[in-house]
Amino acid sequence: MDGQVPIVNASISLEQLPHILARESAHCDLLTQNIVQERDAIKRMALSEFLSINQSRISILESLHQLKDELDLLLDDLANAYQVPLPNRTITDILHRVQSPQARVILAQYERLAAKVRAVKQDIAANQVLIHSVQSFLFRALEAHRQSLPDGDLYSELGARQQHHVPAAVIRRQG
């Protein structure tokens, strides 16, 4: 009877695994949508949208972290039940050790999730490049604007002569 308890627990854990992976996949889809929203806001320079985009991303990432904790506990149970050595306690090693049709289906599901995670990481990296490019452009534009305005040749929006300028708030004297 004692030998059957770990197998029963392992069977229950194995049945829970596809549900956790499906929830992780759904959260990856939400993260992908969030990244697309961010990219659109970057392209439109819609700074006012970034707060809600980032709040949404934080919520998604917190949920993914909770799912990771659930998955880690489940994998520990499975690793112990199937006597998987500590250095080999990855989901793929555990599922290979199980050697059942259900494990092969779960492994395929996990591989699809892993591909989705790689795509999300690439999309995040692409957005980081866009943000960096926009920042660089703005810094160069501000620097070029500062260098092209001589002192004493500027007027404020109200028409007062200025010695120093504030970008986008001065009018250059003509003639």
Image (cartoon, rainbow, N blue to C red):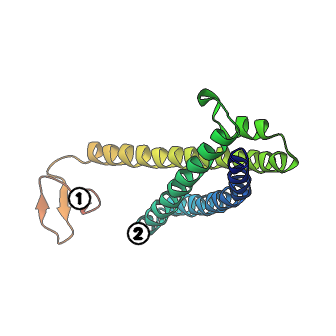
Q: Which residue is located at x 38 percent, y 43 percent?
A: 140
Q: Can you tell which mark lies on residue 173?
A: 1
At mark 1, the secondary structure is: loop
Identity of the amino acid at label 2?
Ser
Report x, y in % for residue 82.
71, 39
The answer to whether residue 83 is above or below residue 29 is above
Residue hosting label 2:
48
Residue 51's image quarter? Answer: bottom left
Residue 114 as seen in the image, left or right of residue 105: left
In the image, farthest residue toward the bottom:
158
Q: Which residue is located at x 21 percent, y 69 percent?
A: 157
The answer to whether residue 144 is above or below residue 164 is above
Residue 81 as seen in the image, left or right of residue 131: right
Question: Do the residues under discs 2 and 1 have CB atoms within 8 angstroms?
Answer: no
Q: Nearer the viewer, residue 169 or 22?
A: 22
Identity of the amino acid at label 1?
Arg
Disc nearer the start of the sequence (2/1): 2
Q: Nearer the viewer, residue 56 or 53?
A: 56
Q: Nearer the viewer, residue 140 or 70?
A: 70
Residue 29's image quarter? Answer: bottom right
